[in-house]
Structure formats: C-alpha cells, structure tokens
Image (spheres, grey):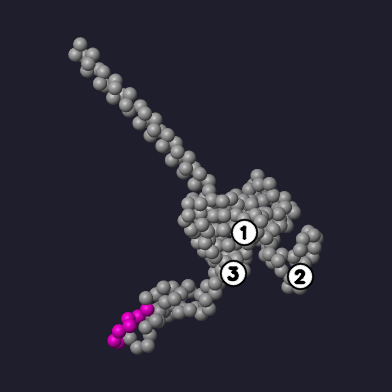
Amino acid sequence: MRAGIIAKKLGMTRFFREDGSNVPVTLIGVEKNYVTRVREVSQKNLKQVQIASGNIKVKKITKPIRNYFSKLKIEPKKKILEFKVANDQNINLGDTLDVNFFKVGQYVDVIGKSNGKGFAGSMKRHNFGGLRATHGVSVSHRSHGSTGQCQDPGRTFKGKKMAGHMGHNKVTMHNLEVVEINNEDGLILIKGSVPGSKGTLLVIRDAIKPKSLLVKIKKEEITEDSSKKEKKAEAKEPSNEKSNDQKPKEDKK
C-alpha cells in the first residue's frame, strides 16, 4: 500500500508508440508533492501520510493554514490530502514526490471532480426513455412520469431518480495505463480520459483492481512457464515414438 500524488490536468493529445500505433492520452502535470505530516498507527501497522501540492496565492489562504506552512518552511499549497500507507514504506516528513513515483506500463486510478452540467432533466441525467412521442401524450414527451404513490405512504421517497443538478461529483477512473513519463517537464501521459476540465486538480494512486502492474507481470510469468512446459513436452514426444517403433521389430526377431 503506497501513497498517491496530487497533479493537474493539462489537456489531451495522442502519443505514438514504437510500433507506429497512436494512443489517446491525457497530459497531467505534476508539481512537487511535499510530505507535511507522518503519523503512525501502531494498532493497524499503518502510517497516515499527509501530502500537499498546488500553487495558490497567500492572500487566498486562512491565517491558521498560513502559519502551519510557515512552521514547515514550505510555501502554502492549494490542496492537502492524507493517505494510508504501509509501515514498511520509507516516507518521512519533508520528503518530496514527483513523476518518478510511477513507472511506464503501470496501471493507476485517477480521482477528480467531473464537469458540472447544471440543472438537467431526467432523460439526460438518468438516461430515461421518456414518454411516447405519439398521439395522446400532451407536451410531456421528456418527462420522468409518476414519482410518488397513493394515499399510503403518500410521499416521494428519498433518492428517487428525478431532474436535478448533474455533474461536479467525485469520480474515480480505474485501471488507466501510464504510457509515458517526462522528467524534464514533469508530465505523466495516461491512456484515456480523466474527470474534470483543464486545470482540475487530480489524485493519482496505484490501481486497486486486478489490472495493476504486479498482476500483469505475474500473468506474463505464468504464460512463460506454461510455454516452456509445452516446449519440453513436444521435445519428449518424438523420443517416445521411436521407442514404440523399435519394440515391434524386436518381437519379430
């Protein structure tokens, strides 16, 4: 279990691989992530690591947070997050994390806030089919239909899918591949799209689902072992055929 880093979405482009194929990628800029606090939890063998990143003007920060960063001798940062990390991870107060925290070919999860779309109807928000657009339906083609019940219970339950505010929610994109890492410009190229618009702050962490780098490596090792066993079995088969051919000749003599 490792920590994650805070990064900024810069936009999208495409990346050409060595074989000539091109991949749609998202450009993510990574500024220095500072470790501002490390607290050990002895009962669970974990560390709680606090990381801060993202430039912000001093006048936009409250006085207590300004004093907190001044004690650490670090410029104030826009976003502060805390991660649960295994005790064996060597992370100390004052350390910095950059693009080299991840490797090319690794799978990561990207967390951010999706684009806000304002007030939306039920068809756009929940993918409803709407009412019939034929004779008999009067100016309610895109409505969501009935929402309540009769006299008992006589109300609309909480969580009913209706029209309302759409977007601007926390979204996690799982198992995105790290295609390229640019150390000079501090860029990470991630295959596919990530939530948010340009300039959105994101959280990047190791993938928690089976497509992580370790699982990928294990699968490759398993396939290599199985191919080696098949080759050995094919090499043994011709020797067995020769021995079987020789036996009937000895019987005839």
Q: Position of residue 37 (x, y in %)?
A: 72, 56
Please report whichever mark, 1 or 2, sits nearer to the chain's N-terminal start. 2
Disc 1 on helix, strand or loop?
strand
Mark 3 → mark 2, Cα distance in angstroms: 23 Å
Disc 2 on helix, strand or loop?
helix
Residue on which the image places disc 3? 198
Residue 118 lies left or right of residue 81; in this view the side is left
In this view, the mark in front (1 or 3): 1
In this view, the mark in front (1 or 2): 1
In this view, the mark in front (3 or 2): 3
**Res. 249 mark:** none
Residue 73 lies left or right of residue 197; in this view the side is right
Residue on which the image places disc 1? 187
Q: Position of residue 198 (x, y in %)?
A: 59, 69
Q: Is the C terminus in the top left, top right, bottom left or bottom right quadrant?
A: top left
Residue 20 lies left or right of residue 112; in this view the side is left
- Residue 133 located within the stretch drawn in magenta: yes
Residue 235 lies left or right of residue 69; in this view the side is left
| Circle 3: residue type | Lys
Residue at the spot x=49%, y=47% of the render?
216
The reply to whether the C-beta atoms of the residues labelled 1 and 2 are less than 8 Å apart is: no
**What crowding class fits label 3: few (fewer than 14 Cα within 10 Å), some (14-19), or many (20 or more)?**
few
Res. 56 image quadrant: bottom right
Q: The magenta stretch spans which residues? A: 130-136
Disc 3 on helix, strand or loop?
loop
Mark 1 → mark 2, Cα distance in angstroms: 26 Å
**Res. 58 mark:** 2
Mark 1 → mark 3, Cα distance in angstroms: 14 Å
Please report whichever mark, 1 or 3, sits nearer to the chain's N-terminal start. 1
The reply to whether the C-beta atoms of the residues labelled 3 and 2 are less than 8 Å apart is: no
